[in-house]
Image (cartoon, rainbow, N blue to C red):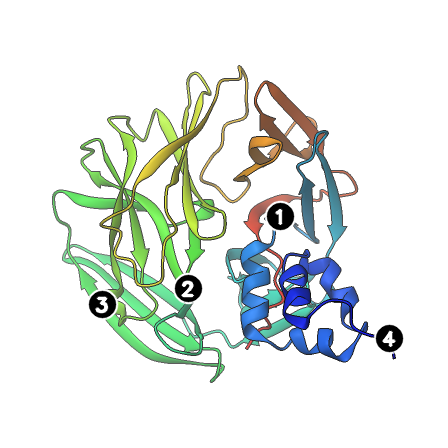
Amino acid sequence: MMERKLPLDLEEEILFRVPPRSLLRFRSVCREWNTLFHNKRFINKNFACARPEFMLKTYSHLYSISVDLNDDPTIKVRDLRFDDLRGHHYNLEGTCDGNFFLYDFHEGGGCVVSNPLLRQTKWFAKAKNICGKYMGYDGSRPEKSYKIIGMSECHSWDGITTTYSVSEFATNAYWKVTDHISFYEEPAFRSDSSGNNRVSLNGNLYWTAYTYPETGQYFIRMLDFSKEIEKSEKTFCVLPCKGKKSTTHTRVLSIYKGDRFSILEQSIKTREIEIWVTKDKIGNGDDGDNVVWIKFMTVSIPDFPIVLSHMSTSYFVDNNIYGKSFVLCCPSKRPKAAWVYIVRGDMCKKIKIGGVVFIKFDQSSVYVPSLITIP
């Protein structure tokens, strides 16, 4: 047996910085390295360091697109080949800890949570008249308690009756169905909790919102998975976007550095983009009172694509030795294709996503490949 050249703790410090796709090949190197894959602390540290990727969903396929932000940026496309998902009409409802949450709205379908890196899937029964909406976990417990929240709405003159249903991964069954009645109020929050304006951080769900009628004030709202349904939704913090109507500008929320927010605002008329990021990380249990925003970058490129808060477009920002980068995944109708745009300084590189079966382009999303297993 060869003498160990590095202390095990130093090896661990090196290994958790290795991309998770490469780490999968290292399991068989030695017993100590294989043990790390069952160490939650190591897995969480690796997840915090992993680089974002795009997930692209067409009618019949799922793909991951990794972006190498070097001096001459490139992309790599992988067909995830989830044969058991094909033939169904699954919509991507979000990601959490590198896991996808997909929901089939058609009769006979259900919920599925999938980790594309580990090739794991977990199926959930479909509750009657309830649509699966959000995935997250209760971060207040020592062990993460993953949940799926479903809901349906009934509109009447008196208000909106929202029926919620919560399913815990441990039970694999829907439970605690509650009805919550909300009434129309002025002013009221007009939220965009659909499409790519939803992000998961620390197990909670966040999205952008504004007051209606519009006052020029924009917010981040949150759904706290550690609370009861009636007490879980609240305003988290104010956005740096002010005085611009929702009809003239679009806003999209994303995650920065794995523990912060970034917000993109684009003028529909000029296509100019401004991006802010939070100065400090968002901790578990943070109430948002002390959030500070700093300007990350401005993108002024004529005829640049519109970044909509729709599931067909997604973005992330990065700051490495090559400089600040803005990376966008979006489709085009003519030609029918999907593209990755990388903007850094004066460079704007447009790369076609090749090898993709475009029967129908549905959705794209940013996610981080993860070694975190589905409970």
Query: From the viewer's perspective, is the residue at label 4 or at label 3 nearer?
Result: 4
* Amino acid bearing label 3: Glu
Label whose residue precedes the other's in the sequence (4 or 1): 4
Q: Quadrant of residue 145?
A: bottom left
Label whose residue precedes the other's in the sequence (1 or 3): 1
In the displayed structure image, the side of residue 218 where residue 32 appears, left or right = right
Whether pointer 2 and pointer 3 mark residues with C-beta atoms closer than 8 Å, the reply is: no
Q: CA distance from mark 4 to mark 3?
A: 60 Å
Q: CA distance from mark 1 to mark 2?
A: 19 Å
| Vertical placement of residue 359 versus 125, above or below | above
221 or 258, nearer to the observer: 258
Find residue 116 and name its label.
none
Label whose residue precedes the other's in the sequence (2 or 3): 2
* Amino acid bearing label 4: Met
Residue under numbered circle 1: 53
Q: Residues within 10 Å of mark 2 (few under 14, many from 20)?
A: many
Q: Residue furthest right?
A: 1
Position of residue 76 measured from the top left corner of the image (x, y, whole percent): 75, 43
Label whose residue precedes the other's in the sequence (2 or 4): 4
Label whose residue precedes the other's in the sequence (1 or 2): 1
Q: Residue furthest left?
A: 186
Residue under numbered circle 4: 2
72 or 185, nearer to the observer: 72
Find residue 230 and name its label.
3
Find residue 203 and name its label.
2
Q: Is residue 108 visible?
A: no
Q: Residues within 10 Å of mark 4 (few under 14, many from 20)?
A: few
| Vertical placement of residue 115 versus 172, above or below | above
* Amino acid bearing label 2: Gly
